[in-house]
Structure formats: C-alpha cells, structure tokens
Amino acid sequence: LYRFCHSLQGHRDTAFSGFTVEVDESPAWSHDGRTIAFHRRIPSAAGPAGVFLTTPYGGEPRFLAPGSFFFPNYLTFSPDDRFLAGVDGYQLWICEVATGQVSRPMYTGEGMFMPDWSPDGKRIVYSRLPLPNNLDSGGVHIFDLESGADQALKFDGRIVYTEGDQPLWTRDGNWIACTESYGTDPERFSLIK
C-alpha cells in the first residue's frame, strides 16, 4: 500500500511546524475490486480537497466530491458499489459514486464515526461518543436508511460501547462484531446479533 500510495498520488509529506501529515488518507476498496476511493486533504493538480476515485492500476485520480483538510474520512463502499459512506464533520456522509451527489441523511449532536454498511445495503452501523451528561447517547448504533430510524445496540439492557475500533457487519448480516469497552473494564471482542 505504501508503494501504491506513492506511485498513485505523487505523495509528499507536508511539513507543519516540525511534523508531517499524510496528504491522502482513508482508502476504501470497492467490492468488485475495480475502484479505490480516498480522501485528499489539500488541493492538487487533480482537484480541490475532497474525495477522489482511482483504479488499482494507478493513473490520474478522478475528483468525486468536495471536502476539507479533515473530512470526509472513514470511507466505505455500499455492497453494490453505487455509494460511499463516510464521516463529514462527525456526521454521516453518503455520496453517489456515479454523480458525486452528497447527502447527509441524519444528524446527531454526539457525532459519529466508523460507519459500515449492512450486506443488504439498507442499514449502517457506526459508533458515537456519549455526552458527559447523557451516557446513553453514545455507543454502537444502527441507522436504517429506508425508515430513518436510529437505535443503540444493547446487550443485557446496557448499551454496547466501542472506542477506537470499527463495528463491522458479518457477511451474512446477522451479527455485528466489535471490541467492547466500558470505563476501566478490559476490552473484549463481542458479536451482537
């Protein structure tokens, strides 16, 4: 991947007061293996900051949708490769791959990160941070794209939390895998039906 990124993007680390920044981040492969999406943090000869598409064989990337230095990130293709989901300003961001049209189908004051599509493409699982005054606002959530309903995953009556690890659907769509963490308890791998 490192060599691919260098040859693909003419990659350069950019110095900012003594540290370097990756110019391109958040790569995502399409399910058919023909396309790679990525977030470019700064404007380049290929276009403004935002999301680009390319092939595994290199070549000039194609600009898809605008972004900023930090967003959109956590990119992931829908099962049919027609859409990309990601996070923009800690909110759900969905982009149609053919047109670059962007939608933001939900809003949460807690923010969200690390989305993953269900195998049928109808739901997205994601994590969100709890508010200090409302711990039940965080945890692993499922957003239903058809109904707009959003619900927290619970086990034994308590919300499932994960910090820093992406919750993922199993290929059959029956389970969500994540690393659970509660306060100072040790992390544990969990499957939630």
Image: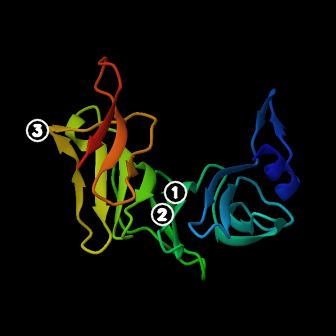
Q: How far apart are labels 2 and 1 at the CA level?
A: 6 Å
In the figure, 174 relative to 65: above or below?
above
* SS of the residue under disc 2: strand
Residue in the image at 46% along x and 35% along y? 164
**Apparent side of residue 123 relative to residue 115 in the rendered image (left or right):** left
Residue pointed to by mark 3 = 157
Residue 134 appears in the figure: no
Residue type, label 2: Trp
Residue type, label 3: Gly
Between label 2 and label 3, give the one nearer the viewer: 3
Residue pointed to by mark 1 = 88
> Of marks 2 and 1, which one's residue comes earlier in the chain?
1
Residue type, label 1: Asp
- The local crowd at label 3, few if under 14, some if 14 to 19, many if 20 or more residues have their Cα within 10 Å, is few
Q: Which image quarter: residue 68?
A: bottom right
> Of marks 2 and 3, which one's residue comes earlier in the chain?
2
Residue in the image at 67% along x and 63% along y? 36
Query: Horizontal and vertical percent for residue 67?
Result: 63, 61
Q: Which image quarter: residue 45?
A: bottom right
In the figure, 60 relative to 7: above or below?
below
**Apparent side of residue 19 relative to residue 77 in the rendered image (left or right):** right
* SS of the residue under disc 3: loop
Q: How far apart are labels 1 and 3 at the CA level?
A: 31 Å
In the figure, 127 relative to 124: above or below?
above
* SS of the residue under disc 1: strand
Residue pointed to by mark 2 = 93
Q: How far apart are labels 2 and 3 at the CA level?
A: 30 Å
Residue in the image at 31% along x and 45% along y? 140
